[in-house]
Image (cartoon, coloured by chain):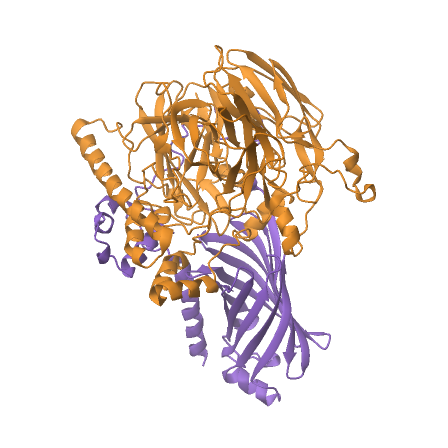
Amino acid sequence: MKPYSSHYLPVPDLPRRRFVQGLAAGGLLLGLPSAIKPVWADAADTATGSAPVLQGTEFDLVIAETPVNFTGTPRMATTINGSIPAPTLRWREGDTVTIRVTNRLPVDTSIHWHGILLPFEMDGVPGISFKGIPPGETFTYRFKVEQTGTYWYHSHSGMQEQTGMYGAIVIEAAGGETIQADRDYVVQLSDWTDEDPMRVFAKLKMQGDYYNFNQPTVVDFFRDVSREGFKAALDKRKMWNEMRMSPTDLADISAYTYTYLVNGITPAGNWTGLFRPGEKVRLRLINSGAMTFFDVRIPGLKMTVVQADGQDVEPVTVDELRIGVAETYDVIVTPRDDAYTIFAQSMDRTGYARGTLAIRHGLAAAVPEPDKPEWLTMADMMGDMGGGMAGMDHGSSGGMNSMAGMSGMDHGGMAMDHSKHAMQAGMAMGGKLARPSTQARHAKTEYGPSTDMRVDMARTNLDDPGIGLRNNGRRVLTYADLHTIGGPIDPRGPEREIELHLTGNMERYTWSLDGLEFGKSTPVHFRYGERLRVILHNDTMMTHPMHLHGMWSELESPDGQFLVRKHVINVQPAQRISFLVSADALGRWAWHCHLLLHMDAGMFREVVVA
Amino acid sequence: MKRYSALAVSMALGAATTWAQAEPATSGHAGHDMEAPAAQSPAPTNMTAGGMDHGDMDMQGGSVPPDARDPHAYSGGHTLDSGKYALPGPRQLRLADEHNFGSLLVDRLERVDTSDGYATAYDAQAWFGRDYDRLVVKAEGDYDQGKLQEARTELLWGHAIATFWDTQLGARYDSGVGPDRSWLAFGVQGLAPYWFEVDATAYVGEGGRTALRLSGEYELLITQRLILQPRLELNAYGKSDEALGIGSGLSDIKAGLRLRYEFTRQIAPYLGVERAEKFGQTADLARAAGEEADETSWVAGVRFWF
C-alpha cells in the first residue's frame, strides 16, 4: 500500500503553483524522458477525466496499482480498472447486479457501495461485513438494486480511497429517468496527495496543525490592533488561547499537500463538459474527497438542486452549496453563454477543484479567487451559548466574524425558545419523543484526554450554511432547504432516542464517539424493525460527515419534522442534529465519520441490527 | 537551605499538577445549563470576560458528573467480536487507535558561542506508542572540545491523564564530566492555557538526592513560518553534589530566545541567544572553580523532526 515514501523540500513559488494547479496533462506521464521514467511507468498509465461507463447486470472490476502524475512527481495510485475515477456503473432499479472484484494489489482490498441498500454481507467493510478481498482473489458481490439516483463506490480498506479507489454509481428508475435533462455529467470531486496517506496521518499525530498555514500570527495581531484597538484584538484571541484551540482549524489537510480534482483532472487540466446554449444540463456532484469539504458554485449560473444523496428533493435554486465528504447532489443548470467555471473551493480556502462547462473544448471562463478564510465563531465553539457570546464581542471582532456571531445569537434565542417549549409540551402531553431532546447528555468517557471540549448548549438550527458561507452575498444551500419528495419512508414516530457525541482532541489528533475510539467501543444495537431517533451532538470544532451504512438517515428539523433522507449528514461544530432510522436491515454495519483520517482514528461504531 | 529547596520543589510540582488537573476542575454541572442565566440573557453587556472564563472552564476536562451517560448503554450486550452477526474468530478490524506511531523531535541542535570557544548542545525527545500510552525518551546535553560535558537521558512511560497533559514515569541517567548519577523520574508534560508547553519533573536519586527540573516553551508565530521561541528552564536540588558543582536549592536558570524559519514544518534553522545564570551555592562553587556564575551566549542551530 505504500510503494514509495515522500520527501519534503522547500517549495519555491513556481513549482508551488504547479502543485496547487496540478499538471495540465493530468494523470499522464507523457513527455517524461524515458531515462528518468521509473520502471513501473511501463505499466499502463492511469486514465483520468470522465470515467468509462459500464452498464448492465454483470461487472468485472480489477484493483491494481497504476502510475499517475498529478503534480510533476510520478506516483502510484490504487485504481479500479485503471482509471481515476473508477468506471461509472449504470444500474437499473429492480435488477440484480453481479460484480466480480479481483484484487491485484499486494494487500487486501474491498469495495463499499456507498448509500446502497443491500444485505450486510455485500456491504464491503472488511472485518464487519466480510473478511475483505485478499491479494490474488476475486470476490463476487451480488444484490438486488432497490433504489434510484446518484451514488458512488470506494474502497473501505486502509487509505485506498485516498489513493484513487472511487467511482460513481448511477441508478435509473425502473420506469425510466424521472428528472429530464439534455445532458448528464458526473462531476466527481476528490483530493490527491503525493504523500503516503499514512505518513500524513503520522504527521498529524505529531502536530495537529501541520497542514494549517493560516494560523493567527503576530502580524495579524498588529493588523487587528490598528483596525480595532488593542483590547479588541486581545479579546478576540483570549478565549481561543485560553482553551488551546485554533480559530482557523477548518481542515486537517490543506492544499499544502492536496491537489483537488474534478473527475480525476487537476485545475490546470480543466475537465470540460459540453453543452448547447439553452440545454438543461444535469450535474451529478459527488464528493469523493478523503478529507475535503467543497463549496461549489458556477459563477453566472443558478443551480437547481433536484436530488440529495440519490433521493429526489423538491427543487431548490441556489448560487452555491457545500458538499460534505461522501455526499452527492444532483443539480440542473441551464447555461446560455459560451463557457462557465465549475468552481469548488476547499472549505479552508487553500485551493480548489475546477472544471468548465463550455460550448466547445478549449474554452474557459474566469476562475475566481478563493474566498478569504474566516475564523470560526463563538457559535462554532459553544453552540447557542456561543451565539450570544459572539454577539457580545461583535463590536470588537470585525467583519464576517461578528455578523456570523450576531446571526448565531438570533438562532440561539430561537433555539432556546424551542427547547423550553419542547420541555413544556413534553411534560404537558407526555409525548416526549415528538421533538428531539435538546439537553446535552455527555458520556462519562468525555471527561478525559480523548476530548478537547464539550458543548453544553449545542445549536440545533439547520439553516446555517456553515463557516465561510455565512452572509457571503450568495444564496447558499442549507439542510433546512432540503425536502425529500414523498416524505419519510416510514410514517412511524420514534420509539426511542439514542444520543451519540462526536468527540476529538486536535492536539493529540484523536477522534472518537462519546470519547471512545473504535477499539474501546461496543456496538450500538438497533432492534430489528424499530423506528428510532438518533441524535448526533458535535463536541468538536470541526464539521463531521456522519455516514450510517445499510439504512437511511432521515434528517429532522429541530421541532421533529421530516426534512430529507440521506446517507451522510454533516454535523457542524457545536451543532446537535437528529434523524430517524428504520432498523430494517439485519446484520452488522459500519457507522463513522467519512473524513478518512477521522474514521481511521476511531470515530467509528459498529451497528448491530438484530 | 534544605527547607527552602524542598519548598521550591513542592510549590513548583504543586503548581504543575494543579495546572494539569485544575484546568478542568470546575464542571460537574452539565445539567444546570437550561437554567444558566448567562445563556438566556440577551443582554450582551452583562457578559464580561469573567463570564467567558466560566464558560470555557466548563467546556474542557473536569470531573465526571454522577448522571453522565454510559457510552456502552446502547450495546444490548453485543461486543465487537461477540453477539449476533459478528464475524467468526478474533476481531479483524483494527483502526489507527490500536496502531503504534512514533516520532523524533530534535528541538535544539546548536552551536553555542561561549566565552571560551564553541560548544555543541542538543535537546531531543522521541516517542513511540499509541495515543494515550507511549514510551518517551528525552535527551539533553552538550559537547565541548569533543568531549561530552553533561548529558541527561530519560526513559519514561508517558500516560495521558487530561486533555493536554501526560504524566511521565521512569528513569534518568546523567553522564559526562564528573561522576554519573541515576534518578527515578516523575513528571508531567503538556500544554498550559495560552499554549505554553510545560515540562515539570521531580527526581529522586541515590543517597537521598532530589531534584526538580521545570521548563517552558512558547511558539510565537510572527508569520506562518517565522517563529520566535522563548524558553525557560530551571533546576533545583535537594542537596549539594559538589563533585558536579551543584549546590542545594535553586541551582540555575536558563532563558533562551530562538528565532527559526520553518522551511517545512519539519526542518527549521534558527538563531538565538541564551542567558544562563547560576544561583546560591551552585554559583559559589562555580566561582571557586574559576568559572563564571552567569553567561550569555549566541546560538545557531536547527530544529527538525520526523
- Answer with the quarter of the image where residue A463 lies: top left
The answer to whether A596 is drawn above or below residue B218 in the figure is above
Counting from the top left corner in percent of width and height, residue A321 is at 44, 36
- B14 left or right of A38? left
- Residue at 54% x, 84% y is B283
Q: Is residue A116 visible?
A: no
Counting from the top left corner in percent of width and height, residue A596 is at 54, 38
Q: Nearer the viewer, residue A81 or A586?
A: A81
Counting from the top left corner in percent of width and height, residue A287 is at 52, 33
The answer to whether A594 is drawn above or below residue B32 in the figure is above
- Answer with the quarter of the image where residue A186 lies: top right
- B248 left or right of A23? left
The answer to whether B73 is drawn above or below residue B155 in the figure is above
* Image colour assigned to chain A: orange
Q: How many marks?
A: 0
Q: Quadrant of the N terminus of chain A?
A: top right
Q: Quadrant of the C terminus of chain A?
A: top left
Q: Nearer the viewer, residue A515 or A60?
A: A60
| Residue that lies at the very extreme toward the left in this rendered image | A428
* Image colour assigned to chain B: purple
- B45 left or right of B164? left
The answer to whether B200 is drawn above or below residue A570 in the figure is below
Q: Is residue B9 visible?
A: yes
Q: Nearer the viewer, residue A283 or B118?
A: A283
Counting from the top left corner in percent of width and height, residue B55 is at 31, 53
